[in-house]
Amino acid sequence: MDYAKRLERVSVLGAAGKMGSGIVLLTALEMADLSLDPAHRGLEFVLNAVDVSSKALGGLMKYLHAQVLRAAEKKAVTLRKVYEKREDLVENEEIIRQYVDDVLAIVRPTTRLESATDSRLVFEAVNEDPALKVKLFGAINTQGPGDTWFLTNTSSIPIHELNEKAGLGGRLMGVHFYNPPAVQKLVELIPADTTLPELAEFCREFAKKLRKTVVPSHDVAGFIGNGHFMRDALHGLAEAERLAKEYGFTDAVYMVNKVTQDFLIRPMGIFQLIDYVGLDVCRFILGVMNDRLPGRHLHSPRLEALIAKGILGGQFADGSQKDGFLKYEKGRPAGVYDPDKGAYAPIAELAARCDPRLGAPPKAWKPWKAVIGDAQRSEYLDGYFRELRGAATTGAKLARAYGRRSKEIGLGLVTDKVAAREDDVNTVLLTGFYHAYGPINAYFD
Ligand code: 3HC
């Protein structure tokens, strides 16, 4: 079966979730492009967007409409060529509207899992729960024709384990997108030992057509991305606990978050990133890794305690950020959670107390967004980190220690043979987490 035929009938499970909605968007765009190609006349492209919540599916359709419209506006010139034979489409707006209709017509939102049984490709993006994934794969596999290919967006569960437990006979591949899938360039590809070579090849082609950067990861719990992120997050949590003894918990969280965002020039501080991913999602991933990597102690009592209080982070259906370690107003951090008081300490008060303690970042400092857009980024970073290495402020010392640990984690992933090369670790952080530089660098020794 060729590439287009395989993509003629697709289902995405967990379609209305954070990752699922991005995967539906990208897959629907690719399917629409195939359907509009005269070479595929006669094929009927259908994408079942399967989710347990019909309300969330309503939100998915709104998200798709807005995003497809943006995509169409960006490629209006190409679309004019695609629709050149349609004499009824003259104005740009008509062409754009037609494309949006064509993409959305492919997507069939449904709460019925059975819709997926006649799919040739099933992309799973449900919760990070091994038993749930195995149950869904097993149900579709036994009711379907037996030659369905399965992709999983699992961010931590070994692919060989899911393949064996669901009895898929090598028809499963890990295809791990990063949040938000429409923005992050990375797709981490994880074949199990038994994954069919033609399925692995299809996944490479699919990722390439989506214009993603592909990094292969070995089939080890957490893979490269979460192998780094989870350890980085645990380090942030440990640093905060250490600083809390001197300054109190809210000050410590503020300080570590500020150092990891500003001093290290990252898009988000580590606590904002944990909130963005979701405390409960992080706990799920840590649980999977901890069970499968004995002796690594990958867990956090602080995370457990906050989750028990219902502090979860993650996003609302409209994409806005829920409170977690930090409180958010208009998407920006506005407070830090104080577990003793069960309330958020205002960020302005924390800044007034903690910023003088940290000291100013190096003079060359620029915000992350300016750095990723800098044509001379590498020269800029050399100069910035030279200054950071020479600085004696508490902020600079914390940043250097953090950068060193981040590098050590990256190198450990190569030593443990999760990543084949140092470059792969760096590419994952650059393209999956939008970092301005890779963790394995000459800035921290
Ligand atoms: N869908 C589509 N587009 C989105 C989007 C979404 N859900 N969220 C943001 N965008 C777009 C915005 O529309 C905007 O587009 P534009 O530049 O064309 O206007 C662009 O992304 C930038 O967004 P904003 O201007 O609103 O905000 P920022 O510049 O701060 O960028 C961010 C937001 C892209 C999320 C950036 O902060 C970032 O990359 N943060 C790090 C996120 C990260 O580390 N992700 C990986 C998490 S780990 C993971 O996913 C693995 C999993 O297994 C746990």
Image (cartoon, rainbow, N blue to C red):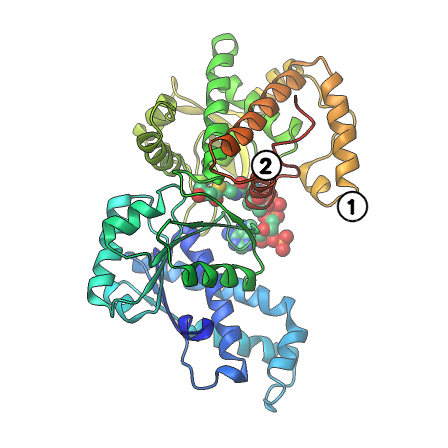
- Under circle 1, the secondary element is loop
Q: Quadrant of residue 443?
A: top right
Q: Label 2, on which residue?
A: 422
How many numbered marks appear? 2
Q: Residue at x 51, y 18 (%)?
A: 239
Q: Please state which of the two labelled residues, at mark 1 or mark 2, is closer to the viewer.
A: 2
In the rendered view, does 262 fall on the left or right side of 30? right
User: Residue lying furthest bottom in this view?
Assistant: 87
Residue 117 in sight: yes
Q: Residue at x 60, y 32 (%)?
A: 439
Q: Which residue is mark 1?
A: 375
What is the x, y in percent for residue 177?
47, 50
Q: Nearer the viewer, residue 67 or 10?
A: 10
Instruction: Please identify the quarter of the rendering in which residue 83 is found.
Output: bottom right
Spot occupied by residue 101 in the image (x, y as percentages of width and height): 49, 76
Identify which amino acid the numbered label 2 is placed on: Glu
From the viewer's perspective, is residue 201 above or below residue 100?
above
Tell me whether the residue at label 1 lies in contact with that at label 2, contact meaning CB atoms closer than 8 angstroms. Answer: no
Image coordinates of residue 226 in percent, x first then y, are 46, 37
Percent x, y of residue 260: 59, 28
The tag on residue 52 is: none
Judge by depth and name the residue closer to the eye, 275 or 389. 389
Q: Is residue 101 visible?
A: no
* Quarter of the image that includes the C terminus: top right
Position of 179 with respect to 156 (left or right) is right
Can you tell me whether the CB of the residue at mark 2 lies under 8 Å from the nearest atom of ligand 1? Answer: no
What amino acid is found at the position of numbered circle 1 in the picture? Ala
Badge 2 local density, few (<14 within 10 Å), some, or many (20+)? some
Q: Is residue 378 left or right of residue 94?
A: right
Mark pair 1, 2: CA separation: 24 Å
